[in-house]
Image: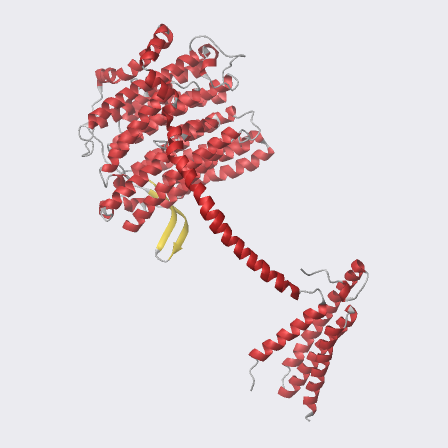
């Protein structure tokens, strides 16, 4: 069904991006309010669309015809079904809260108009990503969010380190994008269409030859690893913390990084063509999640902890993707958006309150100075730790349970191993999050100056997200999976109910919290002993598993050598040689022919007469 | 010789004289006069042909040529004037900078 409101959803933030910049040049204060209003309006439209969505109904709208030649027709069409609805609600809902928060966070920054303009542009691009009806349209959004991410990570571009973090994110994302392009090429070649509604039909997917199916699935997953920070392309995400904190909350926690999971869920038919692909996804996700969780333990920068935690949680979502429980993955996307945005924004308030200090070793005791922030950070910590009845409990529990039901011929007996490993990761998560909470809010203040609570415009959205982190899971748990059963395959109904179930399910989280509390508060002396026992783990954790270094040795160095050779052999001798030869030949010809122009009118006239005579002689029909 | 053909002969003669004048003379005003002469030679040919073929198209074309000649003299004189201002001469050999 055509619906003009769908166009509004995308166009309002897009217009907001332009207008808030233009307005902001004149009055910087207005920029933030206008941008927030734009996203809020978009959110309102999304809600009205979502309410209108009944049964298996979908909306679509053609913005323009974009490309049309020969028998290729590629309309710029957007499409709204239950899956897009969930993503749109998260993007615009959490997005508008973060916009509101940014008004306070960026209040003293001089280039606010630019910031809010980018932020609105990001929302528009993200909406195109989740609303696109064909892969090329999704790709526009995919590239758009990548661009905005680059622009916002390097927002304070005068700092060369920040600027290069932006570049790193962009380049790593490009590697993933290559996978997207390859997948599109294969799917178009085999199926003759890139329309996602057509590509989800089994009879269309059956046209893909089996070996191509494997390549297409892996290529799509490569795209997802770039955008959603999985091994081996995850190192850009921690570096992306160079951007302003609201950006980290919006792009690098709640929305953009979940685009990979959205893509997997959208194209699940392609992913499942070859059972090898889900197996690879599962193992990659597991490795990423474990590595990131271990690294997070030894981080001292509050934003870095959250960044690695995001990588780890994204790994959790991919675990669900790997076992085919896409709606469970989406559920974790939603709850993660709540609690991780809340965590990032609380961290932002802390950084703001501590005069731009990010090192947790120079914080502590902030519970007294910033009670509201402490409360929300605490609630979100319990949520991410997976304590019932907080939001994270339900989604994590659903993931662990779907792992238990995994059946994949390539997993053999290792399915259970992954389940146990994932539980260990959950303990780890609770541990490092509690550690960050204790270092930041408990004990006594170790920094300089006087920390202060953030203004109302910042605490209010954080509190809203804190409430969502507490209740979101409980509310959504019933009905979320059945709601998504249209566009996504059904998942096994999980038991999980009852007080006893809640208590048992919270055990891993509680263990992690208890361990952190014991080691950091009750018996700090024991910490050294634990360190000695786990020296290898500590080395790996502190060195961030040397992923950057490994990439440096195995990818960047060979590429450098290759480009060096290419530069010397191909470029300098062949290309430059040929170029120079062509250049000197034309130069010689020029030297000769320029003698014709003497500057004397009579010469020119003579040439003119002579040529006119010649032309007449050649072309005048002589009778 | 047919009287009308002789008009064509005169037109041809005027045209060639004008062309040779442009090639040989250096004074911009004289060049200008040569151009006018060539244009009028063409006009004469137009009228002659108009008479031969017995229709008025050629004579109409003459009016166009006259208008263009008027416009050309207006612009041309202005150019000569500004050339004179910058190089203090109207000899074309003195204004020969524009080359390689």
Q: How is the image coloured?
A: secondary structure
Residue A463 figure quarter:
top left
> What residue appears at the point 47 percent right and 51 percent down from the top-left corner?
A574
Above or below, comparing residue B26 to residue A412 in the picture: below
The C terminus of chain B - image quarter:
bottom right
| Nearer to the camera, A167 or B35 | A167
Vertical relation: A556 (above or below) A571? above
- In the rendered image, residue A225, in percent from the top left (x then y), is placed at 35, 34
Residue at the image position 60 percent from the left and 76 percent from the top: A614
Q: Position of residue A447 (x, y in %)?
A: 50, 12
Give A174 or A201, whichever is nearer the viewer.
Answer: A174
The reply, left or right, for residue A509 in relation to residue A580 is left
Numbered marks: total = 0
> At 72% from the left edge and 72% from the top edge, which residue is drawn?
B69
Depth order, front residue of A105/A433: A433
Q: Residue furthest bottom?
A: B1
> Residue at coordinates 43% horizontally, 8% vertically from top-left?
A443
Q: Position of residue A273 (x, y in %)?
A: 23, 41
Q: Position of residue A450 (x, y in %)?
A: 53, 12
Q: Quadrant of residue A93?
A: top left
Quarter of the figure that contains the N terminus of chain B? bottom right
Res. A536 in view: yes
Q: Is residue A562 left or right of residue A420?
A: right
- Horizontal side of residue A227 vs A350, given as left or right: left
- The one of A391 and A69 positioned closer to us in this rendering: A69
Residue A134 in view: no
């Amino acid at each position: 069904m055509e619906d003009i409101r769908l166009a509004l959803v995308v166009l309002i933030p897009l217009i907001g991006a332009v207008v808030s910049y233009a307005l902001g040049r004149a009055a910087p204060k207005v920029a933030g309010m206008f941008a927030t209003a734009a996203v809020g309006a978009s959110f309102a439209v999304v809600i009205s669309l979502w309410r209108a969505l009944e049964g298996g109904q979908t909306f679509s709208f053609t913005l323009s015809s974009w490309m049309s030649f020969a028998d290729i027709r590629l309309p710029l069409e957007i499409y709204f079904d239950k899956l897009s609805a969930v993503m749109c609600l998260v993007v615009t809902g959490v997005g508008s809260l973060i916009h509101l928060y940014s008004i306070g966070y960026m209040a003293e920054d001089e280039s606010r108009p630019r910031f809010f303009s980018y932020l609105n542009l990001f929302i528009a691009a993200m909406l195109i990503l989740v609303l696109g009806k064909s892969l090329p349209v999704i790709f526009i959004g995919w590239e758009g969010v990548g661009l905005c991410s680059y622009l916002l990570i390097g927002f304070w571009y005068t700092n060369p380190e920040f600027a290069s973090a932006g570049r790193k994110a962009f380049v790593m994302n490009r590697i993933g994008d290559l996978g997207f392009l390859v997948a599109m090429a294969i799917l178009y070649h085999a199926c003759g269409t890139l329309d996602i509604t057509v590509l989800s039909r089994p009879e269309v997917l059956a046209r893909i030859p089996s070996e191509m199916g494997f390549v297409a699935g892996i290529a799509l997953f490569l795209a997802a690893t770039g955008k959603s920070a999985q091994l081996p392309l995850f190192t850009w995400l921690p570096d992306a913390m160079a951007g302003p904190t609201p950006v980290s909350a919006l792009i690098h926690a709640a929305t953009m990084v979940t685009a990979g999971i959205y893509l997997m869920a959208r194209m699940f038919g392609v992913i499942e063509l070859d059972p090898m692909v889900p197996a690879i996804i599962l193992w990659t996700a597991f490795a990423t999640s474990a590595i990131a969780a271990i690294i997070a333990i030894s981080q001292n920068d509050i934003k870095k902890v959250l960044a690695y935690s995001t990588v780890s949680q994204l790994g959790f979502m991919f675990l669900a993707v790997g076992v085919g429980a896409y709606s469970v993955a989406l559920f974790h996307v939603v709850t993660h958006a709540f609690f991780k945005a809340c965590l990032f924004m609380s961290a932002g308030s802390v950084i703001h309150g501590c005069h731009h200090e990010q090192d947790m070793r120079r914080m502590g005791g902030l519970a007294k100075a910033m009670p509201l922030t402490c409360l929300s950070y605490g609630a979100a910590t319990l949520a991410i730790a997976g304590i019932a009845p907080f939001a994270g409990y339900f989604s994590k529990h659903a993931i662990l349970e779907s792992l238990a039901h995994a059946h994949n011929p390539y997993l053999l007996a290792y399915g259970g191993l992954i389940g146990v490993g994932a539980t260990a990761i959950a303990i780890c998560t609770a541990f490092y999050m509690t550690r960050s909470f204790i270092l930041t809010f408990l004990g006594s203040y170790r920094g300089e100056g006087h920390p202060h609570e953030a203004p109302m415009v910042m605490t209010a959205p954080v509190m809203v997200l804190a409430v969502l982190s507490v209740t979101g899971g409980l509310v959504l748990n019933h009905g979320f999976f059945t709601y998504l059963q249209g566009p996504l395959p059904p998942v096994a109904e999980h038991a999980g109910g009852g007080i006893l179930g809640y208590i048992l399910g919270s055990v891993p989280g509680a263990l992690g919290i208890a361990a952190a509390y014991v080691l950091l508060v009750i018996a700090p002396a024991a910490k050294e002993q634990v360190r000695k026992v786990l020296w290898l783990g500590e080395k790996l954790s502190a060195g961030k598993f040397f992923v950057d270094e490994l990439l440096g040795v195995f990818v960047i160095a060979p590429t450098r050598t290759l480009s060096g050779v290419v530069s010397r052999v191909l470029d300098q001798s062949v290309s430059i040689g040929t170029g120079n030869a062509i250049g000197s030949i034309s130069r010689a010809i020029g030297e000769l022919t320029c003698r014709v122009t003497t500057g004397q009118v009579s010469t020119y006239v003579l040439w003119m007469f002579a040529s006119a005579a010649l032309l007449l002689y050649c072309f005048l029909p002589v009778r | 010789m047919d009287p009308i053909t002789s008009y064509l002969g005169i037109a041809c003669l005027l045209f060639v004289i004008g062309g040779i004048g442009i090639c040989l003379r250096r004074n911009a005003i004289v060049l200008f006069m040569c151009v006018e002469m060539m244009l009028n030679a063409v006009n004469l040919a137009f009228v002659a042909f108009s008479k031969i073929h017995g229709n008025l198209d050629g004579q109409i074309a003459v009016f166009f040529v006259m208008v263009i000649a008027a416009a050309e003299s207006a612009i041309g004189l202005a150019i000569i004037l500004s050339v004179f201002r910058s190089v203090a001469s109207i000899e074309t050999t003195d204004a020969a900078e524009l080359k390689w």
